[in-house]
Amino acid sequence: EAGVTQFPSHSVIEKGQTVTLRCDPISGHDNLYWYRRVMGKEIKFLLHFVKESKQDESGMPNNRFLAERTGGTYSTLKVQPAELEDSGVYFCASSQDRAGQDYGYTFGSGTRLTVV
Amino acid sequence: GENVEQHPSTLSVQEGDSAVIKCTYSDSASNYFPWYKQELGKRPQLIIDIRSNVGEKKDQRIAVTLNKTAKHFSLHITETQPEDSAVYFCAASIYNYGQNFVFGPGTRLSVLP
């Protein structure tokens, strides 16, 4: 089965520009998560979609970040305008929720964002 | 909310020796504890997990132990090999309809030949 795919793998943008990251989850996975790891620190939760609905967006740092998941398939995470502190690796993960079973996620390879 | 601490931040061992990474969590309601391995430039991959109704789980050279009373859990790797070199993340979560993990800061393990 295809894994979680993220695009682009790397992005270098200037402060103030806009960047859009994309995540294609494993087919059939209703749950999609965005995480990020900034400057070698812990992986932090950003938000969680169940199908096309935002289940929890408590980790979104501010209103410069906008996530969408139209149609409940792929998701995009837009940063506008980007700031230096947004640099890091943005991971997407998906899971198939089956009550009592298989709690694990499958992560994508991440998008390394560098804001200069 | 949940807070996960992880120690050590870096660990170097000789090939063939054992490695132990320890994590503590703060929320007694957490009931699922996965460990992820991230090799350089690759995605985090689940290597082992444990649920709160179990005290220990083993899979070949990897084992995880959980002490619910003390709220800590540990990853044990025996007979380490160079390919075990990676960053290891522990995490804690409360199962609900799609859970959100709280990760530890990671441990960079280096296995020296």
Image (cartoon, rainbow, N blue to C red):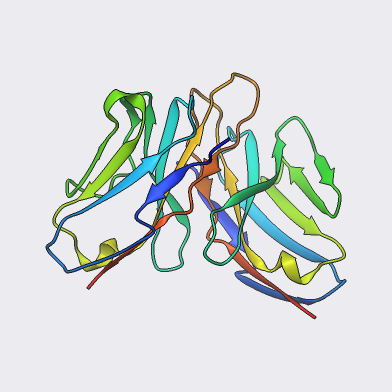
Q: For the point 64% across and 21% down, which residue is it?
A: A100
> Of residues B83 and B80, which is closer to you in this image?
B83
Q: Residue furthest front?
A: A1
For the C terminus of chain A, the quadrant is bottom left
Residue A20: x and y, percent?
24, 50
Q: Is residue B70 left or right of residue B27?
A: right
| Quadrant in which the N terminus of chain A appears | top right
Towards the viewer: A60 or B65? A60
Query: In the picture provided, is B52 more to the left or to the right than A19?
Result: right
* Above or below, comparing residue B61 to residue A104 in the picture: below
Rendered view: B87 above or below A97: below
Q: How many marks are shown on the rendered structure?
A: 0
Residue ID at (37%, 42%)? A23
Residue in the picture at 23% in, 68% down: A84
User: Residue B101, percent across and down?
Assistant: 51, 41
Furthest residue toward top: A99
Give x and y (percent) for residue B30: 59, 35
Residue in front for this viewpoint, A60 or A107: A107
Residue A37 sits above or below residue B26 on the image: below
- The reply, left or right, for residue B16 in relation to residue A51 is right
